[in-house]
Image: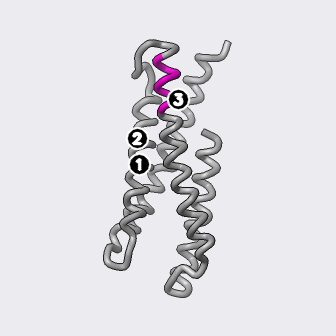
Amino acid sequence: MGLTLAGYGLLAVTGGVLRYARLRSGNSLSPSVRLLHVSAGAGIVALVLVLLAIGIIGTLGEYGRLGHSIHLPLGLMVVALVLTSAWSASRISLERPWARKLHLVLNGAIGLALAGAGLSGWQVVQKYLP
C-alpha cells in the first residue's frame, strides 16, 4: 500500500507539471515527464491488481470468506477508480476534452478511496498480528 501511495504522489506531481506546461505553452513540452507519468500510472494499475489478489487470497486463507469488513468494498472501489482513470487517460485528446476532466475527477476520488482503504486495511492487518 505504501508503494501505491508513493506512486499516487508521483502521479500527482508529474500530472501537475504536465498541466502547468500545457497551460503555459499550449502543449506538454516535457516528453520525459509524460513518459514518467504514464509509466507510473501503469505501475499503479499493476499494484492495485496485485494488492487485490493478495487481499483476496489472504482473506480467504485466514477467514475462509470475503466481506467481513468495509475494506473489501473500499478496495474494490479503488480498483474500479484506478481502472476507469487509466481508461479515461487513454481517451485524452483534443477531440475529447471531457476525458481530461474525467481523469482529474477520478484521480481526486482515488485519493479519497485510497485513504479509506488504507485506514480500513490497517484495521484488517491488526487482526492478523498477535
Q: Relative to residue 121, is residue 2 depicted above or below?
A: below
For the residue pair 31 and 112, the one nearer the viewer reads as 31
Sequence-wise first label, 2 or 3: 3
Q: Relative to residue 76, is residue 5 depicted above or below?
A: below
Q: Which mark is residue 54?
A: 3
Task: Kindly check if marks 1 and 3 are in contact, taking CB atoms under 8 A apart as contact.
Answer: no
Sequence-wise first label, 1 or 3: 3
Quadrant position of the N terminus in the picture: top right
What colouring style does the render use?
Answer: one colour
Residue 54 is one of the magenta-drawn residues: yes
For the residue pair 119 and 59, the one nearer the viewer reads as 59
Dot 3: within a 10 Å radius of its alpha carbon, few (fewer than 14), some, or many (20 or more) residues?
A: few
Q: CA distance from mark 2 to mark 1?
A: 6 Å
Dot 1: within a 10 Å radius of its alpha carbon, few (fewer than 14), some, or many (20 or more) residues?
A: many
In this rendering, the count of numbered labels is 3
Q: What type is the residue that disc 2 sits on?
A: Met
Q: Relative to residue 39, is residue 16 depicted above or below?
A: below
Q: Which mark is residue 77?
A: 2
Q: What type is the residue that disc 3 sits on?
A: Ile
What stretch of residues is rendered in magenta?
53-60
Q: Which mark is residue 81?
A: 1
Task: Kindly check if marks 2 and 1 are in contact, taking CB atoms under 8 A apart as contact.
Answer: yes
Q: Secondary structure at mark 2?
A: helix
Q: What type is the residue that disc 1 sits on?
A: Leu
